[in-house]
Amino acid sequence: MTNAFVMLDPMPTTSPAPRSRRERPAKPALTYEGIVATSVRLMEAEGLQRVTMRRLAQELDTGPASLYVYVANTAELHAAILEVLLGAVDLAPASATAGADWRDRLATVLNSYTQVLFEHPSLAQSALVARPSGPNYLALVEALLALLHEGEVPDAQAAWGVDVLLQVATATAAEQSTRDRSDTEAENRALVRALREVSADTHPRIAALGPQLLSGPPEARLAWVFRAVTNGAKVTPTPSDPA
């Protein structure tokens, strides 16, 4: 009698080929240019305050320590972002063939620089301490110095004057970026009211100049400041020069 229970050989099994836990293309190698480009995109998407070494490392799928090979710290990273954005500054008015008065052309270049910072409010504050040193920054400084030279501003005074002009433009943009529009309007109304109600007995000069203290649109006042600084630089010798 045959056994009804026939033992069959089990079907051969094959183990699946081992798979990598990281099934994706190899990461591109880190480069300074790539780090800065990613930082600019991150700033535009999330704001400059989010552009930290840790957040950037996360975006690049690497460790923060890897970034320090290319960028020393966050301040240097922000300066690199500013350098990229300075490429948008219009330097065409600096050309000697531009035709207009050199002071007006200088103000136009500085207005373009200020506008770049206005478009990136968070960067404006960083620009007060950031020290870019790339080709875009050097081109801006060269353009301003060329205009001061065209206006016959002595070299030593031009060297100091260009620093003040950039400080004024940067501080203007930084101040604008830190103030909420509604708060600014309320503050302006309060100041106008105070100037109108001041007593001529206690504040005679304010009473006399009240309307002029806040007169003129912001762009006109800024252009006047640029011209005032430029005129002052032309006639004010530096301490190292004989008076």
Image (spheres, rainbow, N blue to C red):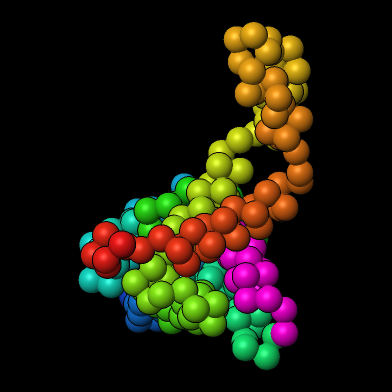
Instruction: Say if residue 220 shows up in the picture.
Output: yes
Q: Residue furthest front?
A: 243
Q: Residue at position x 27%, y 66% from top?
A: 242
The percent position of residue 181, horizontal first and vertical second, equals 70, 35
Query: Which is more toward the observer, 105 or 82?
Result: 105
The percent position of residue 120, horizontal first and vertical second, equals 59, 55
- Horizontal side, residue 184 vs residue 226: left or right: right
Q: Is 33 situated above or below 227?
A: below
Q: Is 49 situated above or below 146?
A: above
- Horizontal side, residue 12 vs residue 107: left or right: left
Instruction: Say if residue 34 shows up in the picture.
Output: no
Q: Is 123 situated above or below 62?
A: above
The answer to if 107 sits in the magenta stretch is yes
Residue 197 placement: quadrant: top right
- Horizontal side, residue 41 vs residue 78: left or right: right
The percent position of residue 124, horizontal first and vertical second, equals 52, 52
Residue 189 placement: quadrant: top right
Query: Which is more toward the observer, 197 or 243?
Result: 243
Numbered range of the magenta stretch: 99-114
The answer to if 209 sits in the magenta stretch is no
Q: Quadrant of the N terminus?
A: bottom left
Q: Quadrant of the C terminus?
A: bottom left
Query: Which is more toward the observer, 76 or 150?
Result: 150
Q: Residue at position x 38%, y 76% from top?
A: 155
How many discs mark residues in the rendered view? 0
